[in-house]
Image (cartoon, rainbow, N blue to C red):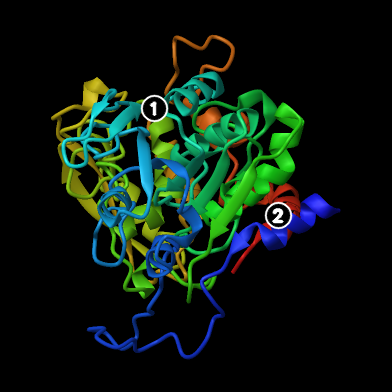
């Protein structure tokens, strides 16, 4: 009972009460925009009180900025109040120069002279070694998540938490709002289908901040995996509520990865990223609208796809007939620089839009084309279908192959979603 009290109480550093009206912040161009402070903003305003006198190792990327777009490592290093001994770069790298599935390597950061360790795909053992070699006492995590289970930064956090617990390091999460809000939705990951795009059993659109996820991980998963918890502290955001989307705030948006350019990209991503699991359809990587432009070779797909989707009258979205040529292949080189036909996902009401239901409807209609083919990974003979790793089990794939419609597919995860909603409730902060 004492440990649970620590997780839900003393282990959280608040930025203050949710006070006053949130709309119409001074200096805001739009009176409807909400003034929100991230955990980093709160930390800076406190004079870095939470980190003084400690040797700090920072896990971050270009999204770790304050309201003036200043990076936390640059702020800490320049303040003279925080001893930053190391930085750790996840997928795409600490300064963000690498593409999907890539990293920047280990080296010296030109701006600060701090050693940056290549942490992309790091195992728990590698994290333990990096923390020990760098002399880190306190690990700080500050990365903008986008709210989907298969976005890898939350699993970077999870694995580094395991390592920090094992080698006795303090773990501080500088919290950031979930840009797509606080609603949980979608299917649950199952134990047999865990991978780097889903290490533990949470639902596809988790509806949690990274600070909330850290609290859930610490209480629900760390004890079963390593027999102990990490000394966790969360520096909370101020003035954020669960129904607030990134577009409703004045928070700065820095691309968390090269194909996540806007907050609308983040909003569609939990649904349209499912097309990573379709070999014959590109999710628009390398275009100006990744994950919003979806299509296959123009010889195989056509305007009927968009027409059928619009006829469904899905909430908050319309589909525009679209033609484009992806300039980044991902795992689909046959589509690289080829003319593709499909749809552009046009969000017309962000608060009504349902990304996963929309993604399922798109899959159901795309499956009617003869050229449709699920992506199979030759390196995994036991679980070859990538869509199964994305959705957490073979259920979605087999139901769509059998001709199930959207309501049947979505209804199949109702019980597990309700169970997750109950499980996460003690760890919510906002």
- Which residue is located at x 66 percent, y 38 percent? 201
- Which residue is located at x 24 percent, y 86 percent? 27
- x, y percentage for residue 161? 57, 37
Please state which of residues 146 and 221 is positioned toward the viewer in this rendering: 221
- x, y percentage for residue 172? 52, 49
Going from the N terminus, do you reach mark 1 or mark 2 first?
2
Q: Which residue is mark 1?
A: 120
Vertical side of 177 occupied by 255: above or below? above
Please state which of residues 122 and 165 is positioned toward the viewer in this rendering: 165
Please state which of residues 154 and 130 is positioned toward the viewer in this rendering: 130
Residue 7 shows which numbered tag? Answer: 2
Q: Quadrant of the C terminus?
A: bottom right
Tell me the crowding category of disc 2: few under 14, some 14 to 19, or many 20 or more residues within 10 angstroms, Cα based. many
Which structural element holds mark 2? Answer: helix
Residue 391 falls left or right of residue 30 = right
User: Can residue 389 be seen here?
Assistant: yes
Residue 107 falls left or right of residue 184 = left
Disc 1 versus disc 2: nearer the observer? 2
Residue 357 shows which numbered tag? Answer: none
- x, y percentage for residue 248? 37, 74
Tell me the crowding category of disc 1: few under 14, some 14 to 19, or many 20 or more residues within 10 angstroms, Cα based. many
- x, y percentage for residue 287? 18, 43
- Which residue is located at x 28 percent, y 49 percent? 77
The quadrant where residue 220 appears: top right
Label 1 to label 2: alpha-carbon separation: 28 Å
Please state which of residues 389 and 313 is positioned toward the viewer in this rendering: 389
Vertical side of 363 occupied by 350: above or below? below
User: Can residue 208 be seen here?
Assistant: no
- Which residue is located at x 41 percent, y 70 percent? 37
């Amino acid at each position: 009972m004492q440990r649970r009290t620590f997780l839900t109480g003393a282990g959280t550093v608040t930025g203050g009460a949710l006070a006053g009206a949130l709309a119409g912040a001074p200096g805001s161009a739009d009176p409807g925009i909400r003034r929100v402070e991230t955990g980093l903003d709160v930390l800076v305003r406190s004079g870095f009180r939470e980190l003084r006198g400690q040797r700090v190792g920072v896990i971050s990327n270009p999204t770790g900025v304050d309201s003036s777009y200043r990076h936390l490592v640059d702020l800490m290093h320049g303040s003279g109040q925080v001893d930053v001994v190391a930085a750790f770069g996840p997928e795409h790298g600490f300064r963000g120069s690498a593409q999907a599935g890539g990293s920047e390597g280990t080296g010296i950061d030109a701006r600060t002279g701090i050693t940056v360790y290549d942490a992309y795909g790091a195992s728990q053992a590698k994290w333990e070694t990096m923390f020990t070699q760098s002399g880190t006492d306190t690990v700080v995590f500050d990365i903008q998540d986008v709210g989907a289970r298969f976005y890898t930064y939350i699993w970077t956090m999870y694995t580094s938490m395991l390592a920090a617990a094992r080698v006795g390091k303090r773990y501080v999460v500088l919290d950031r709002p979930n840009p797509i809000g606080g609603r949980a939705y979608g299917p649950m990951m199952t134990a047999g289908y865990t991978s780097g795009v889903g290490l533990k059993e949470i639902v596809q659109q988790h509806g949690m901040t990274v600070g909330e996820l850290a609290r859930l991980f610490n209480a629900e998963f760390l004890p079963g995996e390593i027999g102990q918890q990490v000394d966790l502290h969360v520096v909370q955001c101020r003035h954020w509520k669960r129904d607030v989307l990134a577009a409703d705030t004045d928070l700065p948006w820095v691309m968390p990865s090269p194909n996540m350019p806007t907050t609308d990209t983040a909003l569609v991503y939990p649904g349209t990223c499912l097309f990573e699991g379709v070999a014959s359809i590109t999710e628009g990587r390398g275009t100006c609208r990744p994950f919003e432009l979806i299509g296959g070779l123009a010889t195989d797909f056509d305007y009927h796809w968009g027409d059928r989707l619009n006829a469904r009258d899905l909430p908050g979205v319309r589909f525009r007939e679209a033609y484009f040529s992806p300039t980044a292949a991902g795992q689909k080189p046959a589509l690289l620089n080829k003319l593709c036909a499909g749809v552009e996902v046009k969000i017309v009401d962000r608060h009504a839009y349902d990304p996963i239901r929309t993604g399922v409807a798109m899959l159901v209609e795309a499956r009617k084309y003869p050229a449709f083919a699920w992506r199979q990974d030759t390196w995994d003979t036991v679980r070859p279908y990538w869509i199964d790793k994305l959705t957490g089990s073979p259920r979605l794939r087999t139901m769509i192959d059998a001709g199930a419609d959207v309501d049947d597919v979505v209804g199949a995860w109702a019980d597990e979603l309700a169970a997750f909603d109950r499980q996460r409730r003690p760890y919510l902060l906002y």
